[in-house]
Image (cartoon, coloured by chain):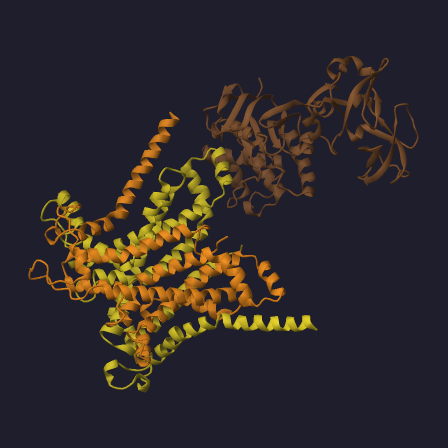
Chain colours: A orange, B yellow, C brown
Amino acid sequence: MVRTKVAAKGIGRYLLLIIVSVWTLAPVAWMVSLSFKGPIEWYAPNLIPIQPTIDNYISLFVPTNPIGGSFFFTSITEAITKPLINSLIVAGLGTIFAVLVGFLAAYGVSRYRAGGTFVIFFTLLTRMLPGATFVAPLMVFYASIGLIDTYAGLILLYTAVTLTYAIWLMKGFIDEIPPEWEEAALLEGASPWTVLRKITIPLTKGGLVACALFILILNWSEFLFALVISVTQVTTLPVQISKYVSAVGRMYGTMASIGLVATIPSLVLAYLIQKHLVTGFTFGRVR
Amino acid sequence: MKTTNRLTQWIGKTETFKKLSTLPLRFVLNFVLIVPFAIMIFLSFTKWEPLSGYDWWHAPIAGVPRFVEAFGDARLLWALIRTTIFVAVVLPLEFLLGLGMALLFLGDFRGKKAFTSVILYPMMMPWVVVGLGFYLMFQYFGPVNLMLLRPLLGEGNMIDWFTNPFLAFVVVIIADVWQWTPLMFLIIYAGLAAVPRRLIEAAEVLGASSVRIVRTVRLPLIKSLIVVALIIRGLEAFKVFDIVYIMTGGGPGVNSTEVISLYIYNLAIVYQNTSYACAVSLLIMVAIALVTRLAIRPLEVKPE
Amino acid sequence: MPRLVVKNLRKAFGTFEAVKDVSFQVEEKETLCLLGPSGCGKTTTLRIIAGLEVPTSGEVFVDGRLVNDVPPQNRQIGLVFQDYAIFPHLSVFENIAYGLRVRKIPKAQMKTKVHDTASLIGVDGILDVPGKKLGLSDMQRVAIGRSIVLNPKLLLLDEPLSNIDAKARERMRAELGKLQKEIGIATVYVTHDQLEAMTLADRIAVMRNGLIEQMGTTSEIYDRARTLFVAKFIGSPTMNLISCELVYDGNRAILKSEDLALDVTEFGETIGGKAKGKELVLGVRPEDLSIDVRKTNSSAIEAEVQLVEPIGAKSIYHLRMSRLAVLAKDYAMLDIDVGSKVWATFNKDKLHLFDKKTEEAIL
């Protein structure tokens, strides 16, 4: 009797799990479906395309004239290769800088109590305040310095915004290394830089990589600042997507395909993070 | 002598290191945050737009009127109200759903890892794509209408989601809940699982049912964790921008779904009303700082 | 009717047999101690009795009722964990009342029960204190109270004193002993500390590798160890073990080793057959070895004192007989010091003799 009760509980659980999974997978499933459908099927409710096609994906890279020629379609004149590359550059470099600056600072704060209130205060602030509140003066500032629509401008911005996470997370990893090991090396005459290089970094490598991957995901998805700073040169993928949405109106298939193209790197990164994480990383204390 | 020399060298090195380690950080933050912040404060007291013709540092000081303007701005008020409502709806939903999912995942079962990966991925997606996804789903000829409403309620009862301000708002809420419930799930689950096995066993031996154990042992012990999670998510929810921009652009109409971030964005970039945007931004910043301070106060005072 | 009957318990985790074949009984008001080193299966046995583990085979009877399929809460047992597992967020009152609340006992009745139990175990002054603020000995009491307030037929304790530092352990051992006497429930107590077992238990079951090596009262275990393992495990300092063999010199039976010869003719009959020709181990507890500066009896053996460990009224003397090192525990004698020559006498009533392959021949 106890057995059947347990079995029923198990089935109930799986039932709920299936429901939750369907809910979670629905939007992406639909986008995948749309992206492989031709225009005829875009307004149809079927999940599996009857005539699958990869035209949508192709048109992302090789813009063509209006598909179908119906009057409310507009043309897409830009390939997504440039925004794609821009995203890679900006997100990548932004991450590298954030990790470098952040690690150094986290180390200084953790071992030498450097920075003091300034660091803590401002790192918290960047997280609390909406990005939009910075947009107005930022535009003015950047315009005066000539950083609008430049890689440097955007990368700098990304670094600043993700620094909080970088420092927060990496400090956690650094704190886990017993300081005695480093102190021993210091007492033997090594400089703090050597200590960093030879001791701390090898030991926190896993955490560093996970941190970098996480920040990479953030930078890849970032939208507001990219939207504001870029005009034509540094348009990133998310910004391009928003342009598509307003420009192409009802071209569901192409919209779906560009959405998916933008998502795949995020998912890959997420998978990599899972692999690299040995100790779970919860926000706040690690132990 | 050699040791003291070495020693002083070392001290020198650590001192410089200490200063150097945060140097890049300071540089970046100063550049990207402090300077604009200063500019913002300055500009809020002026009246200036990029089209004014003169450089911003020549802008005439106009004193307080910008702020007065802000207090009389109905659109600002509505943006704030909408955003607050958004947070007030989204937070409990995400918490409860996250709690439910965490409870569902408690214990061992086959495929747990796979299910967990599936559950967690919405958090990882670029926010604009989430907006895009739901935009596509809730189109008039989209799956929600075609697969759910038409079969259930019949032809002619399909809803045009995005032309109705209320419904459009609902879709935005759904999108946010979809994306961020996994985060709450993650935090809550980590907390629940961290409750020592012994305590659970002790309760079991005393006769408590699983439900009772959750209610009387697991939940009380993660209370502080939950508060932290709510604060973090609350702050982020207040800042919502991407999904609204992509899905509704603030509309239908001019500003029926405009959240505060969107309004400020519009002020600064679309209407190019820079000095006013600065004033509003400043006010919002101050408001948020105050509110967070007040919210954290009762937590800090707790005697431990 | 015995409160607890355990029959042929076996528990295997995959290929590893934690419990091989364990059987015993516990009577009302009796305290049985499962004693043994880590990994001997004692905790697993306890958990099986509690219902937290399902035995691979074997039966558990509580008060005559077969409880193999009965979940822990319905077995009428109380369980006290190693670290007490007090709910930190609940007050002492709520901790004790937890089980009562589960059973939906009416409020007034619950209050009385909790208060009665609290005074029995001595925590009625701290009923409002939250669990996380309790000191260890209070935690121990609350843990016990939490179990006994439900009037269990059987109380199970899993190494309750092993997480405590040595000094506090003495005190709490005494308190625990007192409590047990007052409460008077049949108890099964698991520990690896033989001193605890000797102090608190009525009967001890010494376990090794999933089996009970020997079961008996404390004096039985102490004086009549049936195996080498039991003899070595019990007693502090450890029993002296001397390899020897039985030799006959005319009518006399002598236990002979390289360094000593002990006349054991009086036991000649009992040991004769089993000991002949085999390698033997003579066991003598340090407290059964007395020393004197003069040769007070004929069988005393000469020895030199290597070290004196004062431990109060008695001292531990490290002796050397030719090349053999033994320990003797006797009253502290001021005139005996390192280097002194003494005569050691074996208490013949307390000798143990073992076959080298773990078996016992005589007392």
Residue plotted at (35% across, 45% down): B116
Please tell me which residue is depicted at 74% across the width and 32% down the height of the picture: C238
- Quarter-wise, where is residue A180 in the image? bottom right
**Is C42 placed left or right of A104 in the picture?**
right
Q: Residue furthest right?
A: C294
Please say whether residue B257 is visible from this viewpoint: no
In the image, C45 versus B196, the foreground residue is C45
**Residue B110 horizontal side relative to residue C49, left or right:** left
Instruction: Report x, y in % for residue C100.
Output: 49, 34
In this view of the protein, which residue sits in the foreground, C165 or A219?
A: A219
Task: Say which of C267 and C57 sits in front.
Answer: C267
Instruction: Check the picture and name the quadrant holding the C terminus of chain C.
Output: top right
Mark count: 0
Which image quadrant is residue C213 in? top right
Viewport quadrant of the N terminus of chain C = top right
Say which residue appears at 53% left-offset and 44% top-offset: C91
In the displayed structure image, the side of residue B212 where residue B242 appears, left or right: left
Res. A164 image quadrant: bottom left
Q: In this picture, is A271 found above or below B257?
A: above
Residue at the (49%, 22%) spot, across then down: C57
Relative to B9, C237 lies left or right:
right
Residue A83: x %, y % from top left: 25, 65
Position of residue A200 relative to residue C80, above or below, is below
Residue B96 percent across, percent down from the top left: 34, 48
Please determine whether, in this image, residue B15 is positioned above or below residue A200: below
Position of residue A224 relative to residue C115, above or below, is: below
Residue B137 visible: yes
Q: Where's residue C154, x and y in %?
A: 56, 27
